[in-house]
Structures are given as C-alpha cells and as structure tokens.
Image: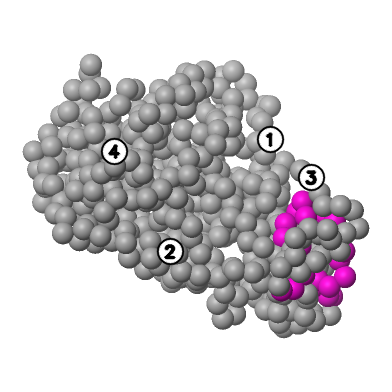
Amino acid sequence: MAAATPKAACTPGGHSAGGTASEGRGYCPLEEEVEGCTREARLPRDGALAACGGSRRSMRKVFLPVLLAASAVAALLLLRLGGGGAAARTRGGSAARVEQLWSSRADSGLCNKIAVPVSVPASYAPSFTLPEAQQDACLKVPRKPGAPHWQGENWCWQWMKHIGCYHNSGTMTWLEAQNRTASFRLAPPVEEARMEPLTEPGICEHASFGAPVDDAQPEEVNEAQAWFDANVSVFVLNMPDDFDRLQYMTTRLRQLGISFERVPGIDMSESGAYAKAKLSGLISKEFNFSVANAVAKTQYQNMEGIVGTVGCAAAHLRAMAFAVSQGNVTGRPLALILEDDAELEDDFVVKLRRLVTTEAPCDWQAISLRTMCPYGICVSPHLTRVLPDGNEPADRCRHGVNYGFYAMLYPAHTLESVHERLWKAVWNNSRPHCLDVDVALASISNEVAYYAVPGFQNPGFLSTGHVESRRGEINMAWLDEPEHEEDAQPVLLTDVVHSMEQRVKDMMNN
C-alpha cells in the first residue's frame, strides 16, 4: 500500500503537501496517507483539543441446481404466518422432532453444557467508560468532513474503527488498533485508558488463536466429518447468473467433503425484481423503498444507496426460511448458510465440531464464523458474545461493528424465532442501516443469543475477498417505480405453503 511522501505535512482537506487542498482543518485520512503526515496536532496526552481529523471511507464488505423458488418463498410465507395456523398445520410434529433432537444431542455434539451463558438484559447496549480527561478529549477530536455527527459522539472510537479495523479488513486486534490510532494522537494511549470493544480481551483477543489445527489425529478428522454430515445442512447464497462463483464453491466444498443446497440471490437492479420480491413476500409489505432510501441519503445516515443491500437482506432472510423448511424435513439440527465468496479452510470441519461441542454455550441461537470489528464479550478462545454498540445511536442501528454474514450457523429449532426478530429489525423504513443483516442482528443481540468468531483470528474458519462484491455496484442502481409499492398486495401462495415439505422431500429423493 503506497504511503504519502515521507515527512509531508497535513494540509487542509486531508491531502499531503502538494495535493489538492480544500477549505477546513488539516487531517490525515487513513493509513496510507497518515504515514507521511506530521504528528504535531493530534490527540495530546493531556486531553486537549486535537487538530488532525480525516475523511470518511466506507469499508467494502465482501458479500444443487437452483432450488424450487416456490419452496423458498413458501418457507418465508410460512414464517410470516407465525407459530400457529397454517405454519403449525404444515409442520405438524416436525419442529418438535428437531427440538427433541437438539435436546437429546446436547451432551454429545451441539453445545458445551458446562459453558455458562452470558445473561444480557433486553435493553443492554454497553458503551465505553473512559476517565474524564480522555472522554472530554475524545469528544473534541475533529470529525471527518461530511461524516454524520450526534451529541456525545466519541471520535476516538470512530477513528479506532476506521484506522484499526475498516482500513485493514479487520486483521488487527483491538489492542493493536488502539495503539495504531493513538500513535496518530487520535485515541488515548493504552497505558492511560484502555478502550475495550471486547471485554475480557485476554480470553479471545489473540490473532494466533485462528491458527490451523495441527494436532487432529485421523480418528478425530473422521469423527468430525461424520458429526458434520449427521448434524449440519449447508446452504450457499449465489446470484442466479453468477456461475463462476457457484463453480468455485462447488469445487471447494467438494474438496472438503461437504454437500450443499444452492439458494438463489436477488439482484434488485433487474427490471421488476423489487416488485416481484415484494409481491412474493420476500420483503415486508410495510417496507417502503422510497421512504427508506430518502432517509438513507440524509447526512445523518450517510448511505450512498440501498438497492443491493435490500436484495442481500431479502436473500439472507429467504435462505433462513429455506433452512427452516429443510430442517423440518431432514431432522438435521444445525443449518450453515454461506455466502459464495467464503473460502473455507482445510480444517473447517474439525474446527467447527470443536467450536460447537467444547465452546458454544447451550443458549446459542446464531454464530458468525467470521466477524470483523467484533464488539461484545470474549467468552471462550474462539467466541465472543455479540452485544449492541451503545456508543452508536439506535436509529443508526448501532452501525459500525460486528460485520460479517459470510458463514452463519444456526440451530434449526430456534431459527424461526431468530428470523422473526431479524425480519422486524431489517424492514424498518426509519433505520436503513438495519438493511445490513449483519448490523441488524448485532443490534438485537440483546434479544438473540448471538456469538461470533473474531475476524482477526487468522486464518480462522474461512477467508473472504477472493472475488469482488457486487453489492456496492448494485447499491448505486436505479430501482424502477418504487413509489407504487404501497399499493401492492402480497400474492397468496397457500397451496405452495401446504405442499412445501412434500416438495422438499420429493426433491431430496430425486
């Protein structure tokens, strides 16, 4: 990564000397530029006003033959109908059978019964408590031009996320991130005030904890594969026209001995795609794109576009619904939903079995197998208990941490409940940042027992980024005629709902 010219001074507008300047204070935006900036006027150790800020740069998030679309839609409608009525009639005793399986297998492979779950109050959203001098200084650190602002915003925390996480794709531990940010006087030195996005950092905040497994004997490898095959259903989200990614995932998962079902993604930039998704029940009938998009483009929300994000959210929610229907049929108690740019490590199956059986508390409802910028509590060497970031406003969906839905693991018997809560959080016109499903689930982690593997543990369970995400490009697309969406009525697919499980059974038998 190219650095700015050595010893260059920061000029107004954030460019090194010789660059284009604009009105405003001098600042050093991010790592490649900040390296060459003089460090004279950043956060002083006495807590006085700093004078070196930076510009906003958003983090790029790396996001079977096609299954019967009607079955996936039907699964979603089934969840929308709630726990009784048609849902109960369709599932019969299947859900009870899966829950019984979960209970009976708790001792032998689906959680660690001696791990103590973290008790989280329903409204809990912890924030930093810094000494008064450092807290005051963090309120005065210059903000990035054009960035959103709110009363009491902690700019040391904003800089720590940008410099220490977004800018390096989450490869730094938070201790490294604070040291890095403090070196530019944009956060307090660790010895004066430790900022701990992860409390109990000694338990899991170590990059080396993601090292490959080197002590697994052939017997354990075979047992792990048998455990995986018996307990885990795998689903891959893939755009209908993205055959290269599908081929890549097919090849890689075959190498690991993993079979999977493909769940088609949703490209909202295609003509009529949004209306079709809305009519099919993939998007809440209460959601209004025009309203949400207008809110998203305000300076406070500061989002460039939401078309691709809406499609990504709808696709993940559909995959969760389909996983529920499959779990009711197969009886496998776990569902793993992968994005098609997730590259699983060679020891993935062994690591997953160890994680679930020896670390995961028995209250877990969701586990992200790679999360960037983790926020919460370290509970075991490879797991954090995700918590909402109380430093960020609720109406911005506590946005900025716990990124990553690359590989999500769910217990089948609680997935319907998680889907229900996530659905309500996502389709909220006034909180467009919640359209990011990873952000939305983190924002309700005081309601859902959500755990995550820190992304700075390298290589961990998987890597990402070998292919470019399409979401940013789709976000900037034009959505055709969303203003008429309030007149749309969802299509009733009662017959499909009632026949869904039989169709899934037929498909599995063919």
Residue 370 in the image, given as x and y percentages of width and height:
55, 43
**Nearer the observer, 452 or 483:** 483
Q: Which numbered disc covers residue 296? A: 2
Amino acid on which disc 3 is placed: Ala
Mark 2–mark 3 Cα distance, whole angstroms, equals 33 Å
Q: Is residue 376 depicted above or below 71 in this figure?
A: below
**Helix, strand or loop for disc 1:** loop
Mark 3–mark 1 Cα distance, whole angstroms, equals 29 Å
Residue 260 in the image, given as x and y percentages of width and height:
39, 26
Residue at 67% of width from left, 78% of height from top? 139
**Nearer the observer, 89 or 33:** 33
**Sequence-earlier tag: 3 or 4:** 3
Question: Is 463 displayed left or right of 104 in the figure?
Answer: right
**Sequence-earlier tag: 1 or 2:** 1
Mark 3–mark 4 Cα distance, whole angstroms, equals 45 Å
Mark 1–mark 4 Cα distance, whole angstroms, equals 33 Å
Instruction: Name the chief secondary structure element in magenta.
Output: loop
Q: Which residue is mark 4?
A: 322
Q: Which residue is mark 3?
A: 2
Amino acid on which disc 2 is placed: Ala
Badge nearest the viewer, 1 or 4? 4
- Which stretch did the figure color magenta? 24-45
Q: Which residue is mark 1?
A: 211
Q: Is residue 425 depicted above or below 123 in this figure?
A: above
Mark 1–mark 2 Cα distance, whole angstroms, equals 40 Å
Residue 330 in the image, given as x and y percentages of width and height:
28, 30
Badge nearest the viewer, 3 or 4? 3
Quadrant in which the C terminus appears? top left
Mark 4–mark 2 Cα distance, whole angstroms, equals 29 Å
- View extreme (right): residue: 7
**Sequence-earlier tag: 3 or 1:** 3
